[in-house]
Image (spheres, helix red, strand yellow):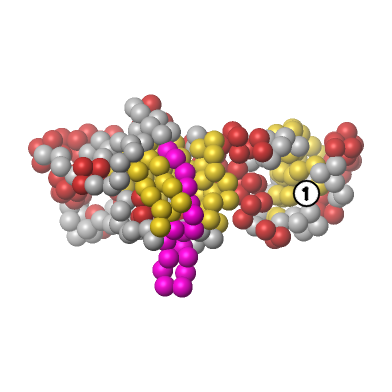
Amino acid sequence: MLTVKNIRKEFSTVVAVDDVSFEVKRGEVFGLLGPNGAGKTTTIRTILNIIQPNRGDIFFDGKPFDDAIRNKLGYLPEERGLYKKNKLLNTIVYFATLKGVPQTEARKRAYDWLKRLDLLAYAERKVEELSKGNQQKVQFIIAILHNPELVILDEPFSGLDPVNQIVLKDLFMEMKDKGKAIIFSTHMMEQAEKLSDKICLIDHGRVVIEGKLSEVKSRFGKNTVHIEFDGDAEFLKATDGIDKLLLYENSAEFEISDHQVVTNMFALLTQKLKIRKYEMIEPSLHSIFLSMVGGNKIKKSEGVSL
């Protein structure tokens, strides 16, 4: 479906994207991840032909971008792109007609989606009267109403409450089952881990990790411990044999660097904490993210309290 090859984009003296490559196939959910300013949005805008790369190539089914491909793409931008004074239904229909959907068909589809996402009561209301979460749902409807083959969503969970996050996740899976290719950018690693078939982690414009999520996690080994507990676990920050510690209020995740420590670790923990759960797991995407983009900020001696 989509092939991105060695793209580079410069703005004045800033290199926003540097030699980025990846591939997304039909029926895949692709997580484009990275910290603020990593180059994710620039990469997305380059794919959409909003801006041109200084170098590199982008192909859709082996062909470069053209007007025929434009209407096969759906895009939800991170910034709100709605006409706030316009009525909700009229706004959705207008954007659909820009993508080649006849007005009568656009209104029918719009009503169906407004009903499905519990927005039908707002159809004749102005966009500015909606909450941020409901505006986000409207932007999602606009992105997919013309039935695109590739859907690109930049921070799609922004402004959504937990219930509507679940609704959106279900829609991801529905589109995937229909053979759509989905690219989404997010800071929410838990969502990315649950949804992504493949990921690309970008930092300072360059690819840090790219590939199938299962393969990425396997590269980081299976010597990661997850615990849930009651008590004060600050002592873990100074415990020999523990690396890449992520310490939460009543849970922690860390790597055991010395395998000889494994057999003694549970005994040590039960001496100092009331352990409710102890398991050896693959590292979470959250810990991989912090490990790869945090550099020396994540140290055994310091840990990260969250």
Mark 1 element type: strand
Q: Is residue 258 left or right of residue 202?
A: right
Residue closer to the observer: 147 or 53: 53
Task: Please state which amino acid type lies under the numbered disc 1.
Answer: Asp
The residues colored magenta run 8-24
**What is the crowding at mark 1: few (fewer than 14 residues within 10 Å), some, or many (at least 20)?**
many
In percent of width and height, residue 16 lies at 46, 62
Q: Residue at x 35, y 29 (%)?
A: 179
Residue 12 is a magenta residue: yes
Q: Residue 119, can we see it?
A: no
User: Residue 180, located in which quarter of the rendered image?
Assistant: top left
User: Residue 265, located in which quarter of the rendered image?
Assistant: top right
Name the residue carrying label 1.
243
Residue closer to the observer: 138 or 271: 138
Q: Residue at x 74, y 32 (%)?
A: 279
Q: Residue at x 25, y 42 (%)?
A: 69
Q: Quadrant of the C terminus?
A: bottom right
Q: Is residue 146 above or below residue 304?
A: above
Residue closer to the observer: 55 or 293: 55
In percent of width and height, residue 145 lies at 24, 39
Q: Is residue 284 above or below residue 78?
A: above
